[in-house]
Image (tube, rainbow, N blue to C red):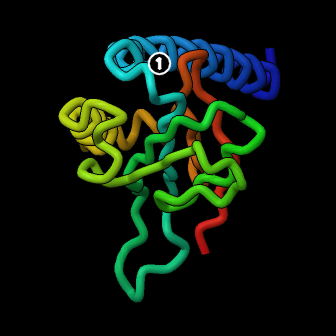
Amino acid sequence: MSITQISEEFIDSYNKIYEELKQKGQENLKEVFKIFWEANPNVNVVCWSQYTPYYMDGEKCVFRINDIMISNLNDKSQFNLLNWGEYDGDDESVWVTDSWGEKSSYFDAAMANQLDNFIHSSAMEEILNSLFGDHCIVFATREGFYSEQYDHD
């Protein structure tokens, strides 16, 4: 057997295990969110951006997770209209917030704070980077998670 064959097998095996780990990680994360969904029927999406800055004014660029946003928006095709606690669409019934005082009559603010703290815990940085990648925005819904590329310039 050659190094090329062994290395290809190694890479294939690693990729298979990595994909299984990502799937299992998302399943476990979905269980955390299940508690949030059950207590917050008016919320349809929780999202956050995560990325490594391209330039930090001489400081080391490190991966980070931004604040979560919570919204009642149910149309996945419009999720890209959620930005920094604002909704840029036309539906006046849609609300979105990234602060727990505002709009907190629509959701459990204490639980939103717990979820935000969990997402921002140091242990979650590596996990979320592994699950969803760098330079993306992650959307959590009752059905699961998906991410899109995020331009943070």
| Crowding near the residue tagged with mark 1, few <14, some 14–19, many ≥20 C-alpha atoms within 10 Å | some
Considering only vertical position in the picture, is 78 above or below 57?
above
- Counting labels gives 1
In the rendered image, the quadrant that contains the C terminus is bottom right
Secondary element type, mark 1: helix
Q: Position of residue 31 (x, y in %)?
A: 40, 11
Q: Nearer the viewer, residue 73 or 92?
A: 92
Q: Residue at x 51, y 19 (%)?
A: 26
The answer to which of 94 and 135 lies nearer the viewer is: 94
Q: Amino acid type of disc 1?
A: Gly
Please state, as top left, top right, bottom left or bottom right, where the N terminus lies in the image: top right
Residue in the picture at 49% in, 52% down:
50
> Where in the figure is residue 102, as x and y percent of width and height?
31, 53
Residue 131 appears left or right of 62? right
Q: Is residue 69 above or below residue 111?
A: below
Q: Quadrant of residue 94?
A: top right
Residue at 24% across / 37% down in the picture? 109
Which quadrant of the structure image shows residue 58?
Answer: bottom left
Tell me if residue 143 can be seen: yes
Residue nearest the viewer, comparing 1 with 141: 141
Residue sitting farthest toward the bottom: 57
Q: Is residue 123 visible?
A: no
Residue 17 horizontal/vertical position (percent): 59, 14
Look at 23% across and 39% down and name the residue there. Answer: 113
The percent coordinates of residue 87 (x first, y second) are 59, 56
Left or right placement of residue 139 versus residue 105 in this view: right
Q: Which residue is mark 1?
A: 25
**Identity of the residue furthest to the front in this view:** 92
Q: Quick check: 37 left or right of 94?
A: left
